[in-house]
Amino acid sequence: METETTPNIPTESHGHGMNGTDKGRAAIKTQFLTTKEKFHELLDSGGKGPNDDKASDDAGPKETAEDSLEEPQEKKLKVDPDEQEKQDSKRMRGQNKSRPHMKPTSYDNRRLCPSIIQERETKCVYGDKCKFIHDVAEYMALKPADVGEHCYLYDTFGKCHYGLSCRFARAHISADLKNMANEERAKAMEGRTPVRNSLDKDLQWRLRKKVVPFTASDAYMKIIFEGGHKAGECWKKAATAENVDNCCSAVVHSQCSEGENPQTSDNQGTEVSQENLALVKTIGPLTDADVIKLRQCEKKQVDFKDKLYLAPLTTCGNLPFRRICKRFGADITCGEMAMCTNLLQGQSSEWALLKRHESEDLFGVQVEGCFPDTMTRCAELLNNKIDVDFVDINSGCPIDLVYKKGGGCGLMTRTNKFEQIIRGMNSVLDVPLTVKIRTGVQEKANIAHKLIPEMKKWGVSMITLHGRSREQRYTKSADWDYINTCSQLASPIPLFGNGDILSYYDAMKARETEVSGIMLARGALIKPWVFTEIKERRDWDISSSERLDVLRDFTHYGLEHWGSDTQGLEKTRNFLLEWLSFMCRYIPVGLLERVPQRINERPPYYMGRDYLESLMASQHVGDWIKISEMLLGPVPKNFNFLPKHKANAYK
């Protein structure tokens, strides 16, 4: 069901809920409101409604009270509107650091040997020392029951490479336990590479052995070390000089004082220049690519104007979720924040954050670091090894682990290092370099307006500004007036605004400022169809069955990305539950007394128009697990989950 509403909404009602009497709580039609006890009673009854028997009515609240105890104490306090103590609200910031963390591998201890899964002709090279099972009959007796009749991988690609270990194996396993293939479908998919930017084993080995050359980065860092505080000015002159095209000649020019000719420098300068020139070893004829460095105007250009940008979201902004958002109309996507040091060490888990799906036509990666040497080397590595349209520097991460090392928001207060990082990365990249920042570190001490004019000089191609400080995290409203001021300072460089966009009304209001585009983060997690709403300028009263279909598509993409065996299925379930911890905050349009829903308004207890809609409104972990079981089958016996992020944005 879809509804059209007019864009004229009274601004004075934006901060009120419950008919304007309870600030900070969403306004829901009276007939849908309920109490906590009745809400959980409905969910526990499976949608059958309360019994007429008084005894069963008395038992209902007791059962839900016990269920509510399963919720972590912090989450209960956050949902409870009566808890106002500042000390408790401070404790609720950040992440559930003490949550039980179960790795997907712990749900599948007895795994089948890959040599049997892949049906290799040769036997396992480890022989009797192999830690996996080689007896197929033994494995099939231990394997959990299949989840469904149809395997998404088999239906899509013509063959499921997980074979007997697939949790949908009955769709493609013959009576003699052989993995079948749809030759016609497999031939049609042959040669297609849906996912790019994977880490190959050879590069990983060379990164771990530290034998990957970083010629351009080393040349830049030599300038930094030898030029001292004037290194930035020297590099800027060298990079913009008409006759200086490669890194070595930039090093030569950096040794000369202002107005001095390199050819007439003293003997010491000549020796240094000859030493630097010897750093570049070439084999065969020289081409233009060897000796000519791209100028800023010659780099790949990206049109950022009037685009909808899906923010890089840690944990939840994975590749399957980005595919969902692309389908709903996101123009720009970006990978999750990756630590530059981990990338340089060849960590597989970190390189997985750089993967790009074929549907992501405008894609970038975000890196975090606090030193110019590692960030410049990381940029050179990415420039040579992966396919991206831009590289983004994270200078807005508020978490202590990053900030205390000088990264994230810490870069905003370390302008010398920040300049060296931006100039260094720009010198080795052939694609645009963008930066994501916050208004500042302290709540009432904005510094973004001072940094933006400097970043224009340093050579950034686009700036994204989150309208909150580090201290605010995600509480209070984003300061769009300040974002507008900064966008004027940034011109002609595009500046994207970020903060509190949950509907097309919010997007229209944001576009009244002079921002070049809009970035969506939590709004996309709560309702990824917000991209469709913005582009079609309407409210979408999406039904619960349509939302379940969206979740089902996510599980399909997750099984394709992480695997359809037990390990991949449970990893998909884990990321689905992380997403549901945000999606449960969505309130259907048909239930709202005032449209639109505001992102920092707390939803009260309400009954949906059907059981599934009520189930999706629950903020109880057990109810999210019920939804996951509808799509991925029963959870393992030792399953345990708590969301990574705490919902502290309502206060």
Image (cartoon, rainbow, N blue to C red):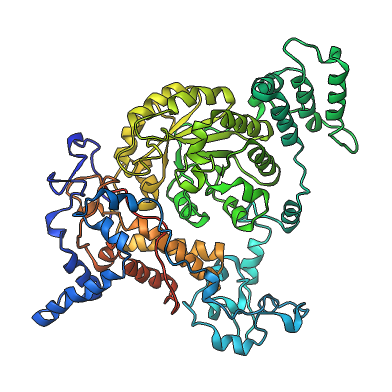
Q: Quadrant of residue 219?
A: top right
Q: In this view, does 488 lie above or below 436?
A: above
Tell me where residue 247 appears, x and y as whole percent. 76, 29
Q: Which residue lies furthest to the top in this view?
A: 259
Q: In which quarter of the image is residue 627?
A: bottom left
From the viewer's side, name the closer residue of 37 and 66: 66
The quarter in which the N terminus is drawn is bottom left
Residue 649 vs residue 606: left or right?
right
Tell me where residue 112 appears, x and y as whole percent. 63, 80
Tell me where residue 183 appears, x and y as whole percent. 65, 71
Residue 37 vs residue 335: left or right?
left
Give the residue at x 51% y 75%: 107
Q: Residue furthest front?
A: 87
Q: Is residue 599 above or below residue 573?
A: above
Q: Is residue 241 above or below residue 543?
A: above
Q: Which residue lies furthest to the right in this view?
A: 284
Counting every numbered tag in the picture gives 0
Residue 47 seen from this side? no
Residue 633 vs residue 160: left or right?
left
Residue 556 seen from this side? yes
From the viewer's side, name the closer residue of 590 and 292: 292
Give the residue at x 39% y 29%: 446
Tell me where residue 569 appears, x and y as whole percent. 50, 70
From the viewer's side, name the closer residue of 41 and 98: 98
